[in-house]
Each structure stands twice: as structure tokens, then as C-alpha cells.
Amino acid sequence: MAAGIAIGQRGPTEWMTSGSDAQRSFWVRNDSKISAAAIAQTGLKLSWKLKLRGEAPEQDNSSSPALLDFYIGYRGFRALAFFGTNDGVTGVDSEIARTEWVSKSEPLAKASESAGCPGGATSLLTRATSTSYPPGPSNRGSGRGTPAKSAVGAPHEGAAGLAAMTSRLNAAPAPPRPRAKPAREAEPNPYEPHIQSVLALTSDGKLHTLWVSNGNEPNPGVDFIPANSRPLGLIAYNNVAYVATSGNCGTAGNGVWSMDLRSKKVSRWSSAQQIAGTAGPAVTPDGTLFIGAGKDLVALSPHELETIGVYKSNDSEFSSSPVAFEFSGKNLLAIAHTDGRLQLFQTKPSAGISPLSESAALSSSASASGSLASWRDAAGTRWVLGAWRGSFSAPAGFRTNGPVSNGAIVAWKVVEKNGGAEFEPGWISGDLPGALPPIVVNGVIFAAAGESAKPMLYALDGLSGSELWNSGNTLESPVQAGSLAAGGGRVYVSTHDGTEYAFGFPIEH
């Protein structure tokens, strides 16, 4: 039973990296507690809050936690959350808010801070993940999906299923299937016994490998990027770690870095243009990385980061990180422009980038910021959504939830047309001052009004954008882009003053 539960709750369904998964979907597909119906009935409660670090330095993104919703250790079954601090990592029992361990890095001389170039920044975290698309929503969360059945057989037939089992045992064995040659290096099986680790990139530019059980670091941190850089979207897959740097901070410049976790070899791709967004590169199932830089959308090979495809925009620059998703058997990618448009691309196995369509601009002054999210509803409709700043009026076709003067969450549908795909208007939320990039949990959209004098977390219905719940006066400090995460029935919010909040449903201990 324990093994079955572990398999049902571990692996790619957890929030393991920036954006939850390699595609940067910001989507938790299966959660056993959070749903639109549950929130509409009881709302969410503050489960706990912890002060874990000093006030965040001057920057426009924070480190979201890496989660391990189900861990079997020598002290039993646990739910763990790992938070980056100004000088290391803190492991927390996420159900009861108990600090499990604290790992501190070497103190670093604090660099001069400026807007977008922090000194002594919060550590970025990730757990090794898969490039495959995570399993789709089961519409029931984790755990048993059907009632237990009796094991008593019919009279005179013995144990239930015995006849069927005997028939299978006596049947002639099926001929073995030929084994297909793998197209790329096989990923490790996450269910085999192994030491589980969390990777941390600290402000001194070193990459650390910490055991999840106790924070032990068996080997010293390894130099990865220059100190006091502005890193974005740390991720690791197939024994290689990747991170983007932006803002020309320090000597890092704009680009993407990789480190082979076995040989410790570091590779780099550089750009003269500003890296778009806050979530770093999006990764398709074949391991190809896609990053926006200025007016360029670039495809990079895994490991060596060779440029293998470039799309050049003829007009505006890109304003968000890309998000990748599967649609009608194709790998698609969406990214936002500074003029308020979304653009849709098909990514081919050869890493070619084919533009498919684009949305109408909301207004000349409104643009998506930070990152996009993507999810698929129970009817199979694919959605792409993001946070738009500024004042704008809804174009034709959108469902609206009130006038927008300071920002809102905007959702588009992706529909099939003439063998391709294009955007179709969905909904626009009510006014969210300083709206920040949203996340999705079981079709519930969580978004923060981050720059308002009254910071607040909102839960919105994913099909209509209508408000289901808000956090009221609970948050005591502004929220920043990239600071939301979810898993295990809880939504996590990191605020500027270094406090971590967890919202969920009350449970007995």
C-alpha cells in the first residue's frame, strides 16, 4: 500500500522547479484538495507563515520553493518544502510548519544593489525533473480513485479472480516485443531507490547539492555562474543543470548556462539582448531549450547550448518567458510581446520554430509580464493566460469581470483551425493592481496583486475568471513575480519581507 501511495504522489506532478515543470506551465494538474467547488464552499485558510530570510533585495522576482509532497524517510511519511534564503536553504515540514534543517553557504561580500541587479540574492532551488509532459489531470487528485472491492468470491468459485488468474497463468506467453532504440539518453527512473537531492544556486554563483532528508551537502558547492548575477529559472534534467542570467548584472551578462552534474563542465550561450521574462527557458520533451531575448526567440541544444533555431520578430520585443505544451499531437509554444500580443509557435523535432498565429493586442500600453501559464480543462480545451499591466478595454469576444485600470489576468483559448492552431478570446479578470503572473491548480487560477498598497492573493475560476476567494489583509508585505507555488493541498506565497505564507484547508494533526 505504501509503495502504491508513493508512486501515486511522487515525481512529475510535484512543484519541482520554477514554473512547476520543465515546460514552465505553472500548472498543478492533480491536487487532492484544491478545486473551484471546495474553495467556493469554504474558502482557503492561512495554514501557517514563517519568517525565513531577510528582506528581499532589489529585484523583480523571488525564489519559489521546491516541493516534495510525499517523502518516506527514517522518521516516517513527510511532506517537505525547500525555501531559498539570502545565504542558503531551509527545509520545512510543510504540513506543520516545522523547520527540519538549515543549510548555510559561505558568506559573500554584498555587492552594490540596483534595480534588477540584487546583491546577496535569494538562493534559487530546483529538484531534478523530467522533460516529458507531466501526466494529465485525473479529475480526482491523488490517491484511490475507485472504492475498495470485496475479495470474497462467488460460492464454489474460490477466491475472487482466481479463475481469471489461472487462465492467464496457463495461457501461452506472448512473444516479446522488439525494443525500440532510444532516441536520446534514458532518464533515470524516479521510483528506483536513490538519494533524493535539492539543488541550490547561491548568490556566490555556486551550485550546491543537498540531501532532502537533512540538508547534508556531501561535496562542496561548484562554481557555476559569476557571483552577484541575476539568475532566472534554475532547472535540472538528464544530469545537467541550466539557468538563465539577465540584466547585465556583474560579469554574467545575458544568456543561458549549463553544468554537467557529473563532469562539472560549464557551457554558456550569450546574447547582447535582454532575456525576456522571469521563468527562464522552457523545455520541450526532446530536451531543447527555448528562450526569448529582445526580438529573438532562440532554440538551444541541451547540454552544449548550441543555437539550433532562431525566430526574429519584425516589430516588438518579447516580454515574457515562453511556455511549452502539447496540442493535437504537436509541441506548441506561446510567448508574449511588449505590445500586448501573444504569439504561438510550433516547435519541430529538428528544433525549427514555425510561427502559427498571434492574438490581438489588448492595448498599446498593456503587456504581459514575467511568465505565462497554460492548462487544459476537463473538456479538453487548452488555455494560455498571463498577467497584463496597465489600463485596457476588453476586445470583442472576451468575458469580462469588471473594468480594468491597473492590471488583470487575461486568458486565451487555443483552438484548432485549418490544420493549425490559433488564439481565441477567453476571459479577463476584474481589476488586479500590479497583477503578477498566475499559477493554476486543478482549474483554479491563483494570482497576486503584488504592487498594491494592499497585497492580496486571489483565487479565480479557470473557466470564467470570476473571483472565488481572496486573502484579505493576511499578507503584510508586497508580493513579487515568481513567488507563487502550490502542491499537497497548499498554495505558497513569498513576500518581500522574507515571510513564507501557506494557504490551504484546515487538517487534523
Image (cartoon, rainbow, N blue to C red):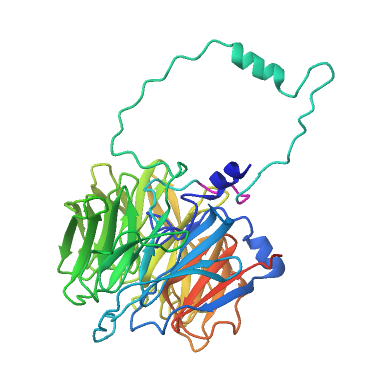
Q: Position of residue 187 (x, y in %)?
A: 35, 42
Furthest toward the bottom, the residue is 453
Q: Main secondary structure of the magenta part?
A: loop
Residue 20 visible from this viewpoint: yes
| Residue beneath the point at 54% across and 80% down | 456
- Between 243 and 272, the one lying in front of the other is 243
Q: Position of residue 272 (x, y in %)?
A: 14, 69
Q: Position of residue 499 (x, y in %)?
A: 49, 80
| Residue beneath the point at 74% across and 24% down | 160
In the depicted structure, whether residue 93 falls above or below residue 175: below
Q: Is residue 156 left or right of residue 163?
A: right
In the depicted structure, whether residue 497 falls above or below residue 281: below
Q: Is residue 73 left or right of residue 64?
A: right
In the depicted structure, whether residue 270 falls above or below residue 470: above
- Between 237 and 347, the one lying in front of the other is 237
Residue 396 visible from this viewpoint: no
Q: Position of residue 66 (x, y in %)?
A: 44, 62
Q: Is residue 97 magenta?
A: no
- Magenta region: which residues? 136-141
